[in-house]
Image: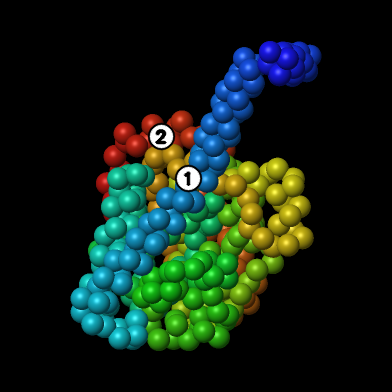
Amino acid sequence: MNSFSVGQDNMTWVMELLNSINMSPHNIINGFMDYSAYFFWVSVLFLLLFSPVLIILGFIYFSNFLLHIYKRKVNLKEDYLSSSWDNGRRAVAHLWDMYGTVWHGYEVHGMDKIPEGPGLIVFYHGAFPLDYYYFVSRLYLRTGRFCRTVVDYHFSKIPGIKLFYNVEGLTHNGRTECTDILKRGYLLGVLPGGTREALFSDENYDLLWGSRTGFAHVARDAKVPVIPIFTKNLREGYRTLGKIWPFKWLYERTRWPIVPIYGGFPVKFCTYIGDPIPYDPNISAGELAEKTKSAIKDLRDKYQEIPGNIQRALLERFEKHPEK
């Protein structure tokens, strides 16, 4: 009995201590439920912020998977740009074209403006350049023309997509290789705004090219036309938190593209192709870069209502614009 009494006294003392610091079993359970709810909403916020990244990465990895299946089925070697890979490229193009059609009602206007032969295709860089992948996929399916692409160095370091990278003709190398690609007769796509424009431009669609003229030097060296292209509602589909100063501060000091991207809204995407800027040996690379920038701004001002509006862009899904 004494032993029981001592144990009972100890338990009573523990309960009194817990009550004194507001830690009764009832409060502990309530606190746990509060933290669970907090964790749930933080998880939802995280998914909203990063689900576009995960979905797009999923499409890239699935494309890579399809190409691996095709490689094993046909027993192909590593001549990735040869015509033997055409059916694999076509399967990947159908995948991205279907994604664009279903999720964004994707349209291209002015396809007939792309001249025969090599040319440098220049895009505005959205938070995600999905419009560019939609465009090159539809171009390939409709005309059979294969467009090589200049990508950011960080993209080339994504693990597990080497086959996709090679078969789709991506490159992150400099002017010499880009010039060589054009001289071999390919179309080449470039987004001069790069990571900075992707992360820190907004619904006003400012072109953040700085003093970049490398693409213009490439076009002059290869003696090819420049084709300016702009996609309407691109920033309404995907947006960034680049205006929040810690993210910009981190990027400016490290060049790490660690800025949350949110959205994935099924807004209408319409890509408009401008008139080609022909090769002119009498203008400098700087002048050509400015002409290209002005041409893209003209397309923006003509087709994009500034500032962009997500609700308006969603309603445009119900409008029909026959492709040309």
**Residue in the image at 69% along x and 67% along y:** 211
Q: Residue at x 55, y 79 (%)?
A: 173
**Residue 101 in picture, x, y percent from top left:** 30, 48
* Front residue of this view, candidates 26 and 281: 26
Closer to us: 97 or 108: 97
Q: Secondary structure at mark 1?
A: helix
Residue 227's place in the image compared with 46, above or below, is below
- Residue 142 can be seen, yes or no: yes
Earlier along the polypeptide chain: callout 2 or callout 1?
A: 1
Q: Residue at x 56, y 47 (%)?
A: 261
Q: Quadrant of residue 20?
A: top right
The crowd level at tag 2 (other Cα within 10 Å; few <14, some 14-19, many 20+) is some
Q: Which residue is mark 1?
A: 51
Between residue 75 and residue 99, name the one nearer to us. Answer: 75
Q: Nearer the viewer, residue 306 or 263?
A: 263
Task: Return the x and y of residue 291 as percentages of the image width and height.
Answer: 57, 65
Place of residue 21 in the rendered image (x, y in percent of width and height, measured from the top left)? 78, 18
The amino acid sitting under disc 2 is Leu
Which quarter of the rendering shows the N terminus?
Answer: top right
Amino acid carrying mark 1 in the image: Ser
Q: Is residue 20 above or below residue 272?
A: above
